Image (cartoon, helix red, strand yellow):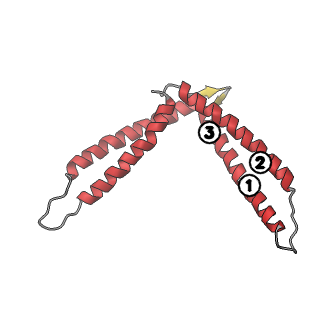
Amino acid sequence: MKLAEALIKRPNLKKKIDNLSARLANSSIVAEGYKPDEDFESLSKMMEVCLKEYEKLILSINITNMKTIVDGISLTRMMVERSNLIKRLVILRKVIKTAIAQKEGIENYIRTVNVKDLHKEADGYAKQLRILDAKIQETNWQTELI
């Protein structure tokens, strides 16, 4: 299985676990004189199988990310860099939005930043993010899950 396939499988398996959790809770109580719609023991066994599969999948994804090296950098490190680029963009965009809002309708405030320069900086981070994300996605589809 390719790493990308495992990454697609992960949220689906998580949804299945969440669904089983709700079904387990629903089968844990019933009105007197009635039987639950589903057997608690059967659901528990299904949950155990899913949790073990999820654990194995997450471990395999993490090991694969750590051992996969692209241009001298691990996939794990690339993902951390991507996360930081996203954070930088969120922060810069918030500052830009605030600086622009202060310009409109409030006379006693002045900007302490150059919005044009901040836009340029944000555009640079956005470009780096696109390039890095493309490299990560390409690697995910080329890498076999360990």
* Spatial CA span between label 1 and label 3: 21 Å
Q: Amino acid at mark 3?
A: Met
- Is 8 on the left-hand or right-hand side of 95? left
Q: Give the secondary structure at mark 2.
A: helix
Which dot, 2 or 3, sits closer to the camera? Answer: 2
Determine whether 63 is above or below 125 in the image.
above
Pointer 1: what residue? 93
Q: Amino acid at mark 1?
A: Arg
- Structural crowding at the residue carrying mark 2, measured as other residues with C-alpha within 10 Å and reported as few (<14), some (14–19) or many (≥20): many
Choose the circle earlier in sequence order: 2 or 1: 1
Residue found 64% across the figure and 33% down from its top = 134
Residue 2's spot in the image, x, y percent? Answer: 48, 27
Pointer 2: what residue? 122
Q: Is residue 58 visible?
A: no
Choose the circle earlier in sequence order: 2 or 3: 3
- Structural crowding at the residue carrying mark 3, measured as other residues with C-alpha within 10 Å and reported as few (<14), some (14–19) or many (≥20): some
Residue found 18% across the figure and 67% down from its top = 31
Residue found 29% across the figure and 58% down from its top = 25
* Spatial CA span between label 2 and label 3: 19 Å
Q: In front: 18, or 59?
A: 18
Which dot, 1 or 3, sits closer to the camera? Answer: 1
Pointer 3: what residue? 79
